[in-house]
Each structure stands twice: as C-alpha cells, then as structure tokens.
Image (tube, grey):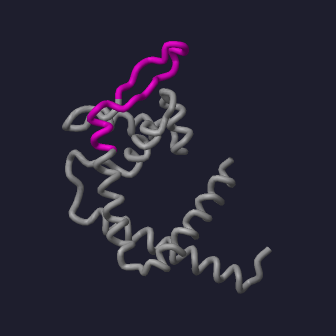
C-alpha cells in the first residue's frame, strides 16, 4: 500500500499523463475532420482487423474494444458507409449463421495505413523535441508500461 506521499505523487503523475494525452488529442484534431477521415474507435476497429490472423466476428471485435453491442453496430455501419467506399465487408459466418464475419476492404487497408502514418508522423514530430537520452528513457518507460498493461489484461 503506497504512503500518502507516494499516492499524491502517483496522482500527480497520472494527471500529467492525462494532460499530455488531451494535448496530443487536441493537436491532432485541430483543423477539423475531412469527411473521409475516421474516428479513433473506427481506427481501433481497423487495427484489430489488420492484425487478425483469422477473420473476426463483430462480437470478437466488440469484446476487444470493450464497447456495447449497440456501439459496435454503429461503428460497423459507419465503416461500411464511408463516402469513398466501404472500409469493411460483413458476411454471415459459414459455421454459425448468428455471427457476422468482418474483413477489411482494399479501401479499408488504404485508409488504415494512411491514418496510422498520419498519427505516427505527428508523434515523431512531437518526440523530435526530446534529446536522444530523454527519448531512450521515455521508450524504456513506455515499454515497461505496455508490459504491465499486457500482464494486467491477461
């Protein structure tokens, strides 16, 4: 159990991380959204699909995202109705007709890669302001945090 001082320090760290997250979100969203752009949740859906070794169902994606079924339905419908063409394809699962398989379309792959590159470029630009030593230390800490997250979700 942390001491009062440690608890206060952890709260201050958490506030700083949250403030940084908000600043990054705000900076990346300045200038508005193009009609063909995607939301963060849509990107996360495309990311799950791009990393899938087997075709996931709507329910599989919903559980990975941690959203409600109604929210997942809205996300899928939105990805199917993009102005430049659908980003996902939905088909009834051959072995269980109650399930819907979801896969990326060619346009979905293109949009996913473009959005990912945009976010990476924005992050790289931000990190350029750090010294090599600070970047290495930051990377070490980020990897440690990701490892802790993976352990806690397993």
- From the viewer's perspective, is 2 left or right of 60? right
Q: Residue furthest front?
A: 132
In x, y percent, where is residue 111?
Answer: 28, 43
Q: Is residue 10 magenta?
A: no
- From the viewer's perspective, is 52 left or right of 25? right
Q: Is residue 138 above or below residue 34?
A: below
Image quarter of the N terminus: bottom right
Nearer to us in this view, 27 or 108: 108
Residue in the image at 31% along x and 69% along y: 27
- From the viewer's perspective, is 154 left or right of 124? right
In x, y percent, where is residue 75?
Answer: 39, 39
Q: Is residue 128 above or below residue 145?
A: below
Residue in the image at 36% along x and 32% along y: 104
In x, y percent, where is residue 91?
Answer: 40, 20
Nearer to us in this view, 143 or 85: 143
**How many dots with numbers?**
0
Region in magenta: 89-112
Residue in the image at 35% along x and 51% along y: 116
Nearer to us in this view, 128 or 10: 128
Q: Residue furthest bottom?
A: 5
Residue in the image at 39% along x and 72% along y: 127
Toward which corner of the image does residue 72 lie, by quadrant?
top left
Q: Is residue 42 above or below residue 30?
A: above
In x, y percent, where is residue 154?
Answer: 68, 47
Q: Is residue 97 magenta?
A: yes
């Amino acid at each position: 159990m942390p001491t009062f001082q440690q608890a206060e320090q952890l709260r201050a760290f958490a506030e700083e991380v949250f403030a940084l997250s908000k600043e990054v979100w705000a900076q990346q969203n300045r200038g508005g959204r193009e009609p063909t752009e995607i939301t963060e949740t849509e990107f996360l859906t495309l990311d799950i699909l791009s990393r899938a070794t087997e075709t996931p169902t709507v329910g599989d994606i919903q559980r990975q995202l941690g959203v409600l079924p109604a929210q997942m339905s809205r996300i899928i419908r939105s990805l199917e109705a993009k102005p430049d063409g659908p980003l996902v394809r939905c088909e009834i699962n051959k072995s269980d007709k109650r399930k819907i398989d979801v896969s990326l379309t060619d346009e979905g792959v293109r949009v996913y890669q473009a959005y990912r590159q945009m976010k990476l470029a924005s992050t790289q630009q931000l990190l350029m302001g750090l010294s090599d030593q600070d970047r290495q230390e930051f990377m070490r800490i980020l990897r440690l945090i990701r490892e802790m997250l993976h352990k806690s979700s397993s």
